[in-house]
Every structure is written in structure tokens, then in C-alpha cells.
Amino acid sequence: MKEGFAIGIGLIALGVVLQLAVGPVAWSAFAWPVNGVVMLAFVAIIALIYALRKRVYAMLFLGTNYAAIPAMALAVVLTIVMGLTIQSAEGTWFNNMLSFWPFVLIYMLIALILGQVIIGRALHFKWKRDIPFMLNHLGLFLAMTTATLGNADVQRLRMITTEGLPEWRAVADNGMVKTMPMSIELKKFMMETYDDGSPKRFASAIKIVEKSGREMEATIDVNKPIVVDGWKIYQYGYDTSMGAESKISILELVSDPWLPLVYAGIFMMLGGAVCMFIFGKKRK
């Protein structure tokens, strides 16, 4: 356990040095296809470490509980810190933990350990004993790695639509204008209010024309998006000065191409939990 905590604390110290030297992790540099290459390289490194485990003690150590338990303990501490502090993309250190080097390095260590355990169990696979184990561990590995590397490909754009005018341009947070693979026309903005005049519900009836020429009409409510060409379209805002008479609707368009893999990992873990009940040994 001392060795395990020494490795973890050493990685945290290295992370602090990197944070001071180069700044936070620049996830934008990992946009596709770089993140795909990094994913393949990471899997190859895991396989190499496992292949050399009988020759190098440190690599053998990564597949043991003595490495896993300290790494998870340190990850829990850092995650609690993240939960207790306000997180912002513009934040630094504890206020932007997803780009904080110590946090990233500890979770990389956990992924390395997971990889060793998964390979070891896969090579000695037994049907009922190992199905829950493999689903839980492989699902966690998939969710962790794809959520992290896929973050660089997430796009969040806002589109201001005007009643009766098709719009195909959207704006990112940095002000960059992006041409969308569809046009959106606001047909009617709708609002319901409480007795004091505050908004109770607001939604937009829109017409969408895709590049292929396919047309569709839909109504978008707050927290009830629609999906078109891999983009989720949310109701975001409106012209507050006009209220219910607004002729403008602000939509948020979100693309996260790695999200299906993250969901696959989560559902694998849920499946593993179910299998534990099905295949678990009955005890008096």
C-alpha cells in the first residue's frame, strides 16, 4: 500500500509541476483524429505493460490491489474536491478539475490499472464467474476513456432564429461562426406565463431543412430537445424585451459524437450489476 500511495502522490506532484509549467490540459488539442490515435496508443501501452509484467516488477504491481486501492482513494479525494468547488471552463486548478493535471493523471493511472485487470481476467475467462466482472470493469474503462478523450469533439453552438427567416449559421462561445448542415426557420414562438407574468413555459415551433432536402417540423420545449444529423437542438432563450410576443428564439445546438460510447460503458456497468444478482452464489 505504501508503494501504491507513493506512486499516486508522486503523480499528483508531477501534475502540479506540469500545471505550473504548461498550464491546464489543453483538451482542444485532442480533437478527432488525434483522440482516436491517443486511444489506440493507450490501449497498446496497456497491452505492452501486461506483456512485460513478468519481467518488470513495477508493471506487475499495476495489476494488484496494492496499486488499485490507493489510486481509487486519491481519485475519491480529488472528486470530492471537484464536487465542493464551482467548476468553470475558465477556472484554474480546483475550479477546472477536468483540466487539472493531478486529476487527469490519477484517472489515467486508474485506467491503466483497469486495463491490466481486464486483460488478466479475459485471458482466464470463466463464463458465469467473469461476465459481471468484465461488464463492470470494461464498462468503467470505456466510459472513463471515451468521456475524457471525446470531450475535445463536443460542440456547443447558439443560433438566433427569426420568425419567417431560415437560418443556417450558429455561433460558438469563442465567437466563431459555423455553417450548420441544416437550416432552421422559426414558425412561431410560444409562451405560457404565471399570474405574475413570469414564464411558465416557452417553446418554439420550427421548420428544419437538411442538406439532403428533407424537411421536418417540430416543437422544441425547454429540456425537450430534438436530434437532427447528430445534433441535439435545445430551446435556450428568446427576446426577453418582447416576452410572449417575441419574434426571436435562441436555440442551442450540441454535438457529442463520443456520447454513445460513454452510454455503452454505463449500460455495461448496469448490466454487470444485474448479472451479479443472476450469477451470484447463494449463501445461507
Image: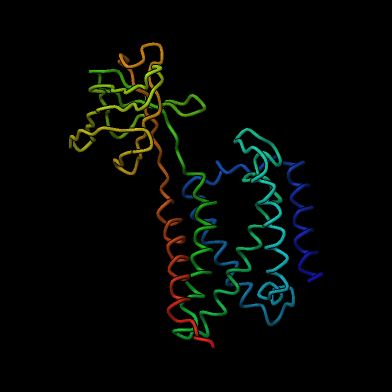
Q: Is residue 62 above or below residue 280?
A: above
Which residue is nearer to you in this view: 60 or 48?
A: 60
Q: Is residue 188 above or below residue 73?
A: above
Which quarter of the rendered picture does the C terminus lie within? bottom right
Q: Residue furthest top?
A: 241
Residue at x-position 49% and y-position 86%? 282
Which quarter of the rendered picture does the N terminus lie within? bottom right
Q: State which quadrant residue 4 falls in.
A: bottom right
Q: Is residue 219 above or below residue 34?
A: above
Instruction: Give x and y (percent) for residue 132.
Output: 48, 75
Residue at x-position 19% and y-position 35%? 216
Instruction: Give x and y (percent) for residue 195.
Output: 37, 19
Residue at x-position 35% and y-position 40%? 231
Query: Is residue 259 found left or right of 28 in the rendered image?
Result: left
Instruction: Give x and y (percent) for residue 177.
Output: 42, 25
Q: What colour scheme governs how the chains and residues are painted in the rendered image of this protein? A: rainbow
Residue at x-position 54% and y-position 56%? 38
Q: Is residue 255 above or below residue 59?
A: above
Q: State which quadrant residue 228 falls in.
A: top left
Q: Residue furthest bottom?
A: 284
Query: Is residue 65 found left or right of 122 in the rendered image?
Result: right
Instruction: Give x and y (percent) for residue 144.
Output: 54, 57
